[in-house]
Amino acid sequence: MSHYAEALDEIMESYPGQPEYLIFMLQDIQAKYGYISKESMLLACDRAGVPLTQGYSVATFYQSFRLDPKGEHEIRVCSGTACHLKGSHRLVEALERRLGVKPGETTEDLRFTLNTVNCVGACALAPVVVVDETYQPNMSAKKLAKQLKTLDHELTIDTKEQGHG
Amino acid sequence: MIEFNINDKKVKAGAGWSLLDTARHYGVDIPTLCYHESVAASGACRLCIVELKQGDWSKLVASCIYPVQAGINVYTETKRVQNVRRWIFEMLLSACPASGEIRRMAAKYGVESTRFPIHDPDQTCMVCGLCSRVCEEVVGLSAISTVDRGVHKKVSSPFLRPTDVCVACGSCVSICPTGAMQAIFDSVRGKPTMQLTQLTA
Amino acid sequence: MANPGTALKREDWRLKSAQDLAALQNQILASRDPERPEIVVCHGSGCMANGSPKVTDALRAALTEAGIDAKVMPGIKTTGCQGFCSRGPLVLIRPQGLFYEQVKPKDVTEIVERTIMAGEPIERLLYKLPETGEPVLTEQEIPFYNLQQRIVLHNIGKIDPADITDTIAAGGYQALAQALTAMDPEQVVAEIEKSGLRGRGGAGFPTGRKWRSALNAVAKKGRPIYVVVNGDEGDPGAFMDRTIMEGDPHAVLEGLIIGAYALGASQGYLYVRAEYPLAIKHLEIAMSQARELGLLGENILNSGFSFEVQINRGAGAFVCGESTALFTSIEGKPGNPRPKYVRSVEEGLWGRPTVLNNVETWANIPLIIGNGSDWYAGLGVPHSTGTKVFSLVGKVNNVGLVEVPMGATISRIVEEIGGGVPDGSPFKAVQTGGPSGGCIPYHLKNTPVDFDSLTQAGSMMGSGAMIVMDEGDCVVDVGRYFLRFLEEESCGKCLPCRLGLTRMREILDNFSRGQGSEEDIEDLISLAQAVQDGALCALGTSAPNPVLTTIRYFKEEYLAHVRDRRCPAGVCKELITYAIDPELCTGCASCARQCPNNCISGEKKKPHVIDAALCIRCGICKETCKFDAVKVS
């Protein structure tokens, strides 16, 4: 645990102890650990000189902060207008069916987190899905299935138990 | 003294007054829910909306927070104002169906029923923020705040867990306009750590 | 990361005057041979997602292998977005100016052998004119480009944003030098006033007037005053600001420094959306290189003026594009807006006078100071001077970044530059202004695109996203889409927005299910009016716009939903059925294999059938079918 505390201290020390740096600290914590633990939140609020309520309000207000760990892989479907017109909502539905979670949730085995993301500005390639940090252009349900298979060898392409007919 | 007009009648206000302060001083009725003299005005519930007019130009502003200005014409019951109020009350009746206070106020302004679906029949909190403001500004503890965003916005203590930053002064309960704080208070404060019988043992 | 010049050491190269800057520019230009071949690869976010980094890597490898003499070895330059996104990945070959489109790594060997070494253009990589199919060699011959007026975008796609010497060579920072050494702050403000520049973030407030009010506020309240860049481009479909920040970060910086000088600010903030990591990276590199040259920081160009900038990253909230929410976010709090009865120029960041302008607005400043307000006021139309950058997206052939003088018509942008709708049909509507704007129908296609004309038509300029819709797009669905977006992004503080947007969206949900009545449409308009009048900030007050404009121009389509239980565009799930056309179906069963609900059945090689009772209308069968046999009705 001391490694964790040391690393957190490093983040805190790199910013002046003022309220305006609260979000900077939380962003560094989020980037490093994938979520903001209660302990790190307390430290950040302490360093910034703000009440814990401000830290919690900030962490729950802004979409990029998570308070629980996310899955190994994050799949974000762009919800921009161009992507919507090209059927991004159908991609979200396909992922909901396949992963068994809704946007914002993580699969029970902690392998995948599903999310939507606001327009990422690559509209010529709509519909766009961001898998981890990579932008996947011109996505379709079929391509998504292939992507998931590449990420996790245990998931199969076939969604059905029976054969067709 | 700053002179202007409310509903075509001349009024005089002190420096630093709001339109609402002035209206109340002159007995002009403007409904409010998220306003309380002991904390800073927030202009959140929008019930106190009034219309400023100058010839063709007009603007709707929150009277609790709009500072008085010489020569302006303020109207408290125009069609646009009434439209805003009416819809807010009708939406409140579906969002906070269990609040008697809201029902009473809505009825006073002619709104007695709502066409909107009721998703949570026990809800009384309208997230006006008075509780968190009094805890921050008057009590100075900031034990609670408004968390999340949009339709999920609610009042809570950090991590939705009981907090001992709260000293159970009850200010939030007394300032709450709908009576919602009583229930929230219990989850903020948590179970008592000491039973009274232990003292007498 | 590029090396900022071979000998750019702080002690040697810190510029101490305008003459030093001019000398540096000459030095850089002299060291570059304009005849030397150069391969310019677009590394804008769109082309990068489409594989341009792999093309660049392949080029590097191929050039090395080709054993070309070091003296004539072509350089490879990576740039920001070249704008013609739907034809990417884009590669330009200099000095001929050859324009290659849709370049893949497998094309690279041929490019090196035929074009670089033998000077031959490769026909299959050339752009073909749509009417004749004739290939053209250069950008200038492509209507998408030659019908534009790229002044804000003039460097983007030509310079390496991570190498300040490119910017200096192109004349960067000369406007700043001029302002600092030959103009006083009052003159700078006067020039911006005379130019007629209006804010490019959406509201179109006259920039000069904003700066003038700020000067008055400082006269009353004293310093500090802050200058802030609004880089929180949140409108879905908008990527103009992203392109400017990624592709020409110095344009924004230079504009900001000039503004800071004019307003007397010593501290500035760049508020950039978290979802734009490349923009943040390029801005950081640009700031660091500018500091090294003494163009940012202490005593800029020895003028006595000092100015520093901090980058604040957004944390995922569209509402933080609104000024009071943006300030509150910089202050370290949740981005809840405040009622704006006292202007930000008087009370903004920490209650101090603050000038907040959009990225594109700031990028216009060096152009105005450098070329003069008369020149700028001569572009565009009288009440909307200058140019505007638009991101043209949706159902249009040429998706990308378009810059035109204000006053160009919608038809010019969508049909002439954009190439119209892919299937050749007239567009149905163009959505401008994002979630705050409205839809302009086809019959108004000659509406000039300027602030006032768009507002009169019921929409607004907005930040520049221009979304083209065709007959396959349902206005009720688009209305729902924008309301759902704003519902998610609402801060939740005020009742009209927090409650009203959801109630409006629920009404539209009903319409999309064929429920509701004409009376409901009238109620929706009345509720929309209440939200417009009552909401606390511009997110709420403008939220009803898409719904109100679509009702205004497409009332029949709403009536079709509620009166006839029909979705003419074939979008609203509960009102459509998927069926297989037996004439076109080959019985290959690809769709049946993909169907998540087992709805499709049939014998091998015989037409298949969809069981409508089981069909969940996910659309996967239609997407899979190679014979276009799945029809929506």
Image (spheres, coloured by chain):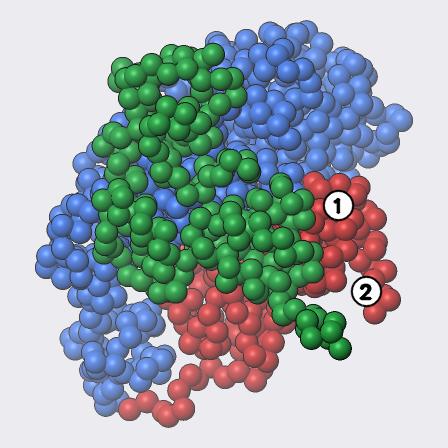
Residue B145, image x and y in percent? Answer: 58, 51
Q: Is there any visible trace of residue C621 in the rendered image? A: yes
Position of C187 with respect to A41 (left or right) is: left
Residue bearing mark 1 = A49
Three-letter code for the amino acid on which mark 2 is drawn: Tyr
Point out the residue furthest to the left here. C564
**Residue that appears at 53% across and 42% down:** C336
**Residue that appears at 73% across and 74% down:** B200
Position of A137 with respect to C262 (left or right) is: left
Q: Is residue C597 above or below residue B137?
A: below
Q: Nearest to the eye among marks 2 and 1: give it.
A: 1
**Disc 2 chain ID:** A
Q: Assign a secondary structure to mark 1.
A: loop
Residue B174, image x and y in percent? Answer: 52, 50
**Residue that appears at 74% across and 62% down:** A39
- Disc on res. A4: 2
Q: Are marks 2 and 1 on the same chain?
A: yes
Residue C451, image x and y in percent? Answer: 36, 25
Which color is chain C depicted in? blue
Please name whichever residue, A137 or A22, is drawn nearer the observer in this view of the structure. Answer: A22
Give the alpha-carbon distance from disc 2 to disc 1, as whole Å: 21 Å
Which color is chain B depicted in? green
Please name whichever residue, C592 or C208, is drawn nearer the observer in this view of the structure. Answer: C208
Three-letter code for the amino acid on which mark 1 is drawn: Gly
Residue C522, image x and y in percent? Answer: 17, 45
Q: Is there any visible trace of residue C30 in the rendered image? A: no
Position of C601 with respect to C408 (left or right) is: left
Lower position in the chain sequence, tag 2 or tag 1: 2
Q: Is residue C141 above or below residue C560?
A: above
Mark 1, Cα crowd under 10 Å, few <14 / some 14-19 / many 20+, is some
Which color is chain A depicted in? red
Q: Assign a secondary structure to mark 2.
A: helix
